[in-house]
Amino acid sequence: MKIRIEKASCAGNARCAAVSEELFPLNEDGYIAVDKVDVPEGKEQLARRGARACPERIIFIEEE
Amino acid sequence: MSATMSPAVPKPDHVADAAVYDFDMFADPAYVADPHKRILDLVKNAPPVFWTPRNGGHWMIMSHEANFAAARDIETFSSNFIPKERLAAMQAQMPRHLPMPLPINVDPPDHTKYRAPLQKVFSPKTINGLKDSIRELAGQLIDKIKADGKCDFMTSVAEPLPVVVFLKMLGLPLERMEEYREIVSQHLSDPTPNPIDSIKKLWRIVDSIKDTLEERRVNPQDDIISMLWKTEIDGQPMTMADMENYSVVLFIAGLDTVMNGIGHGVRYLATDLPLQDRLRQNPELVGEASEEMLRRFTFTVPPRIIGKDAVFNGLEMKKGERAMLFLPAADLDAKAFANPDTYNLDRENKTHIAFNAGVHRCLGSHLARVELQVCYEEMLARLPRFRLDPANPPTFHCGHVVGVSSLHLVWDT
């Protein structure tokens, strides 16, 4: 599974990281540090939950 | 709290009759009696975006989609209430620095510049480091009232907890808490946008903390004021004027918001004993429970000024008009949340916008979340089933913060 994040639109809610800090690493200010995530096998459900938790709706599942 | 409705002003010609709905966001009697009940009624019966003739006449952004769009469209829904040129002209007439609640009332690029020094202090990482001390403080406050079997939750827990945390973070003397609270509640309770009175109130805030600002400049401690003195804004060293601006915004935002969020949450908990039981048995669910509390009882109403003539949601809006991002209604919108009036811990989608969306997302949201969750956890862990006192129903106040004024609880001892 691959995830795309519109990093520039991140508002620093950090809800994705509240679901999984490992999948959604934050920078020092608490904003998303990456714009792509290769989701390790077995973490797909967590990735989906993290994407859904974003109030800015900027986390997209690109490939199932 | 009793309140008088403001007079209705005539509708401007460009506002269609169908877009008008009469609602006083400070004094509507049903709203002040039980705010979120009235909001549910508005969500059902008022247009998704409407113009109210009360409080000088302004737009109300109600639906989730409209709020989401408006929060992002900062050119139309600007936070720049006073243009830079006018501000400079006003400043030139003033005997002293005119403090501005930055970065709340500016748009990017200035917003980005003034917000930057604050980001790290309020980041999830920094805030998580405060969690244990917040828990200790919450525990102490609750233990103090435990044997009484009753309390006014607002004065005994909801108010002191976030205020003490915030004053400690800022490095302000705790013994002056009452004075600070009084200044802030006065600041937020005035519905009339009279610029001179507003400025005087900002000066009052500055006057109450200026000695601490000056002291920390020469004697830095481990607090936000000292840290900000060491920061630069856009490559320039911090000035006393910058510090006054930050103090005003942190003061206003830190002292009167979280306490009301906790009040709404604990009020709901007191009415839902099965939920209390479930959370006592499964404390790991309190984080989720707290999110659903924020959704069900969203309580802030950020104001905006229309930055350019625009058509929004099919309605003509003119530059200079005021609009309210009525976030409590957005999070009770049935299009975004099925059965929005039901508090549902198992709801799959709890992605609310209680902290707003876009660049002005609440800087203190991570702190607020920790305080809310820890407070619920400690209430549930330290007290048996608590209920509303039937003889003293809760009271509320309404405005840019929809707040709980008193919340009398009872429990068995």
Image (tube, rainbow, N blue to C red):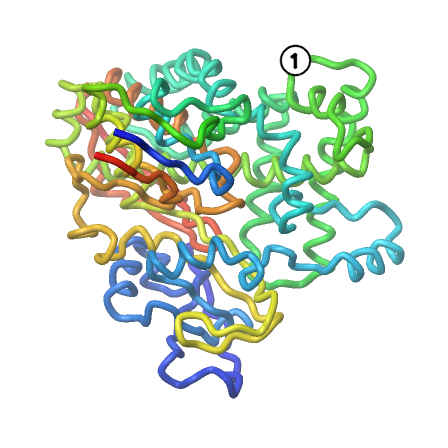
- Image-based side of B312 in relation to B231, left or right: left
Please give the chain letter of the residue carrying mark 1: B
- Which of the 4 image quarters holds residue B111? top right
Rendered-image quadrant of the C terminus of chain B = top left
Residue drawn at (55%, 50%) of the image: B188
Front-lying residue, A44 or B390: A44
- Residue at (55% x, 39% y) in the render: B253
Q: Residue furthest left?
A: B274
Q: Position of residue A37 (x, y in %)?
A: 36, 27
| Residue furthest front as drawn | A63
Residue at horizontal 44%, vertical 46%? B356
Name which residue lies at 43% across and 54% down: B398
Could you say where residue B194 lies in the image, as x and y percent from the top left?
Answer: 67, 63
Q: Residues within 10 Å of mark 1 (few under 14, many from 20)?
A: few
The secondary structure type at the circle numbered 1 is loop
Q: Is residue B408 visible?
A: no
The front one of B59 and B402 is: B59
Location of residue B198 (image quadrant): bottom right
Q: Above or below — where is B5 with respect to B119?
A: below
Q: Amino acid at mark 1?
A: Asp
**Residue B227 placed where, x, y %?**
69, 20
Q: Nearer the viewer, residue B149 or A41?
A: A41
Q: Quadrant of the N terminus of chain B?
A: bottom left
The residue lying toward the viewer, choosing from B60 and B379, is B60
**Is residue B287 toward the left or the right of residue B119 in the image?**
left
Expressed as whole percent of the image width and height from the top left, the position of residue B20 reads 40, 79
Say which residue label 1 marks: B222
